[in-house]
Image: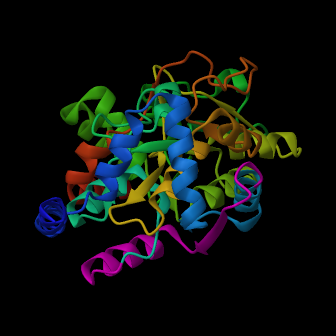
Amino acid sequence: MQRRAILLMLFALAVLFARILPAATSEETLAQINKLPLAERQAALVRGAKNERSVVWYAPINRENLRQFTTAFEAEYPFLKVDILTGGPQTLLNRILTETRAGKYNFDTMNVRSSALYTLKKAGAVMRFESPNRRALRAGFADKDGYLNGLWASLLVYMFNVNQVPRAQAPKSIDDLLQPKWKDKLGMDEDADDWLAAVMDYYGDARGKEIARALGAQHLNIRKGRTLVAQLVAAGEFPLQIDGHHHEAVALKKAGAPVDYVFPEPFVPVKAVSMFVLSSHPPHPHAAALLVDFMISKKGQDIAYRQNRWPAHKEFATGSPDEVGNRKTVVPDAEKWGARFEELVQLTSLLHK
């Protein structure tokens, strides 16, 4: 009888402490799992994911490219279904911020430009997740705090019309672009903040502002969308694009368009990294962790590579003429420019003279 009373008392204390002690957050739970040896970690994630059965991805990617990722992931984990919500990046970002303010947590993961990280962290919409696969990523594709898991980025090159610019006369540096002969002949995207951020990260604020003013004085042909600017260069509307997407230049050249390109010197600017983030309150945390692992794994990154993206995984560089190789690249500092985004937009306006 006394033993039964002791057991009842212990049970009552356990219930009391369970009520007093807060439940572990998803971030804490995944952090503990990440401390396990790799095989045990994988087993723990799979056990949890089998109970969750699905994962919700907010994805600003075209449907065919997206299908390649989800098909491969579901083949790897046939007990999981990827539920997708597609839309424009700003639309999905605004949706997440609205849901978070309302205390609704519908998404598990989202891919978004790294320049949005500051806003997402400030809103409490995302959490840390230290996937072991981060170790294989290029410099600038993962942050020290564990929020940013880089997927891919776009190298920005000088693309020119070969009927108007012989390759030997193509500019190789910003100093070349500032020569009088290029006045009125340079095209650039209206959304040039990531290009300017990379320039300022390399040269410093003072020199970066000087460059922006000097380029603005060249009377740039500003258009909305890098793809449109590339098409206008191919059509001969103006001879050269300052911030052409590398993969678009390669594709146009291979398709027979009269274009070529050069990697800028002394560094190649990189458009803000496309990153994977985890919701601060994911409905399916274990499945979400597996999806992040997959997307930055060599298998997931191979899909990105075959889609002509510049993948985060540092093993993907063949050394062919179309590859950046060992040239210096500069990825804009997501934390710094997230905090200074309004200032960066104002500085970008210097290009629009």
Residue numbers of the magenta segment:
75-104
Figure check: 99 above or below 7 = below
Q: Tell me, yes or no, if residue 178 can be seen here.
A: yes
Front residue of 17 and 79: 17
Quick check: 285 left or right of 152?
A: left
Residue farthest front in this picture: 1
Quadrant showing the C terminus: bottom left
Figure check: 186 above or below 158 = below
Quadrant location of residue 298? top right
Front residue of 231 and 353: 231
Quadrant location of residue 170? top right
Residue farthest right in this picture: 256
Quadrant location of residue 218? top left
Residue at image position (68%, 57%) is 232
Residue at image position (39%, 45%) is 148
Q: Tell me, yes or no, if residue 153 can be seen here.
A: no
Residue at image position (39%, 39%) is 130
Quadrant showing the N terminus: bottom left
Quick check: 264 left or right of 30?
A: right
Front residue of 236 and 5: 5
